[in-house]
Amino acid sequence: MFRGSAPARIDNKGRLKVPTTFRRVLEERYGRELFITSIVGESVHLYPLEVWEELENRLAGLPSTDRTKMRFLERVAYFGQQAQLDSQGRVVVSPLLRESADMTGEVVVAGRLDHLEVWNHDRLLARFREQPFTDADFEYLSERGI
């Protein structure tokens, strides 16, 4: 599982150096192959290719006419690219996704259990202010035994 968060940087060539704690889990459990994408373009999602393929298999079980599936696939295809970590643990984020998610300089890499999510630090803090975790959120999780 990918847990916690760590600061990182996107260099001037668009390379993200995956923080050591995440890199170790990624390489030991999944290897170096990734699928990099976004759904709404605010952040970058780094999926181990094996995890992404499992998600694709679940999506394939939905009817091809399912509009939600179609919208999801349109977006992840638009932003998506298959990539591989280099020997230094870096991966290139496409210019399209870097621009959309404002991926320059300091970023935050956060564990999302089965994948990583990368945010522009300032954008993430603004999101916390705009979308606070509420009592209703706590209640929702509590009702599900979490």
Image (cartoon, rainbow, N blue to C red):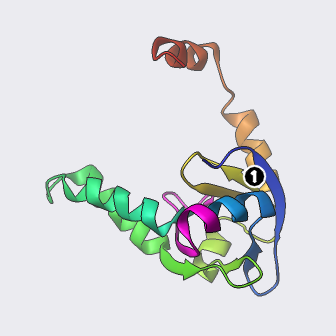
Q: Position of residue 83 (x, y in %)?
A: 55, 80
Left-right relation of 9 to 2: right
Residue 82 visible from this viewpoint: yes
Left of 80 or right of it: where is 129?
Answer: right
User: Depth check: 89 or 129 in front?
Assistant: 89
Mark 1 secondary-structure assignment: helix
Residue at horizontal 51%, vertical 57%? 40
Q: Residues within 10 Å of mark 1 (few under 14, many from 20)?
A: some
Above or below, 112 against 41 in this view is above
Q: Residue furthest front?
A: 28
Residue 93 shown in magenta: no
Dividing the picture into quadrants, the one containing residue 101 is bottom right
Q: Choose between 37 and 27: the one closer to the eye.
A: 27
- 34 in magenta: yes
Q: Which residue is mark 1?
A: 123
Please give the name of the residue rendered at 76% of the width and 43% of the height, measured from the top-left corner. 126
Q: Position of residue 124 (x, y in %)?
A: 74, 48
Q: Amino acid at mark 1?
A: Arg
Which residue in the rendered view is the most extreme toward the bottom?
A: 13
The answer to whether residue 106 shows anywhere in this view is: no
Front-lying residue, 10 or 130: 10
| Residue at left offset 74%, top offset 74% | 16
> Magenta region: which residues?
27-45
